[in-house]
Image (cartoon, rainbow, N blue to C red):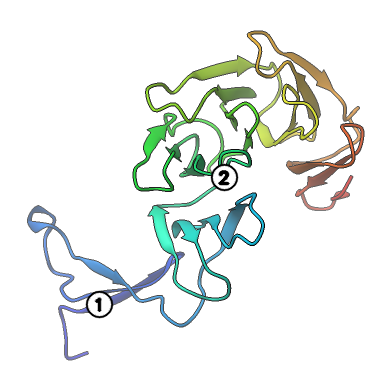
């Protein structure tokens, strides 16, 4: 009231203000400034940590608020390194200069110098909105869901001159969860939107082997897979309503 050109809007990213909402598109459109100050509106999908004792360096992907770089403990300012919806992110556990963030579907960003520069990987058109993804630090390989139960494999993702994208046709339903085995670099576990869990063996080879291990026990959408003391100890969660959620 009393300032007809000024406006405040809210959305799932918080509160935004513009001095002049009347600017037409052909003149640059209204410029909105973030007003998320002194309170939290951010929901994080994922977090990655440096494998260094005493480090306070983290990456975190936030819903509609980009992917952020943390360098201090406690509540403080962060640096938004990539924008939009921030999904899964990774810091290589052997070479911490290799870092990955993601946007929606199979759109990824990779840096070798902690975000002074970075490059795009993937088309950003396949998989799920916040796309199931996992990274193998030993082989520098990123695994991501594709459409129709297929799996993207990005080998040597830290090399700046190639995407090295392979499409592995697994012959299963849509992938909803991915977990690289910490005990065998060629073993990847995947879950589906229909409650199936598979072991993908020889995951870095030209031909992979896919074996079902859920035996039709789980009902619903597989949301996560965690590996325990060895590949025989696995924790699985399902997020559908009215079903057993933890296996």
From the top left corner, tell me how far across and down residue 40 is, in percent: 52, 75
Quarter containing the C terminus: top right
Residue, far front: 53
The quarter of the picture where residue 30 lies is bottom left
**Secondary element at tag 1:** strand
From the top left corner, tell me how far across and down residue 167 is, in percent: 55, 17
**For mark 2, what is the residue?**
91
The reply to whether residue 96 is in sight is yes
From the top left corner, tell me how far across and down residue 150 is, in percent: 62, 22
Q: What is the number of the mark on residue 7?
A: 1
From the top left corner, tell me how far across and down residue 153 is, in percent: 57, 23
Q: Is 102 left or right of 138, judged from the image as shown?
A: left
Point 63% across, 37% down: residue: 134
Q: Is 230 left or right of 31, judged from the image as shown?
A: right
Instruction: Name the residue nearer the viewer: 201 or 9.
Output: 201
Quarter containing the N terminus: bottom left
Alpha carbon distance from label 1 to label 2: 40 Å
> Badge 1: how crowded within 10 Å, few (<14), some, or many (20+)?
some
């Amino acid at each position: 009231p009393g300032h007809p050109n000024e406006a405040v809007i809210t959305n799932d990213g918080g509160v935004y203000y513009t001095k002049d909402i009347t600017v037409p598109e052909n003149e640059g459109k209204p410029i909105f400034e973030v007003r998320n100050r002194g309170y939290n509106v951010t929901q994080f999908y994922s977090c990655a940590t440096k494998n260094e004792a005493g480090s306070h360096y983290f990456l975190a992907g936030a819903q509609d608020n980009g992917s952020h770089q943390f360098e201090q403990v406690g509540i403080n300012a962060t640096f938004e390194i990539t924008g939009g919806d921030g999904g899964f992110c990774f810091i290589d556990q052997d070479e911490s200069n290799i870092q990955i963030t993601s946007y929606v579907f199979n759109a990824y960003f990779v840096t070798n110098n902690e975000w002074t520069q970075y490059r795009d990987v993937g088309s950003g058109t396949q998989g799920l909105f916040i796309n199931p993804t996992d990274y193998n630090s030993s082989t520098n390989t990123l695994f991501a869901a594709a459409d129709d139960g297929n799996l993207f494999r990005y080998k040597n993702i830290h090399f700046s001159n190639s995407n090295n994208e392979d499409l592995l046709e697994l012959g299963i339903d849509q992938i909803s969860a991915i977990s690289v085995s910490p005990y065998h670099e060629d073993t990847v576990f995947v879950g589906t939107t229909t409650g199936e869990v598979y072991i993908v063996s020889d995951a870095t080879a030209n031909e992979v082997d896919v074996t079902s291990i859920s035996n039709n026990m789980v009902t619903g959408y597989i949301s996560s897979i965690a590996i325990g003391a060895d590949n025989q100890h696995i924790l699985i969660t399902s997020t559908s309503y009215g079903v057993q959620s933890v296996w």
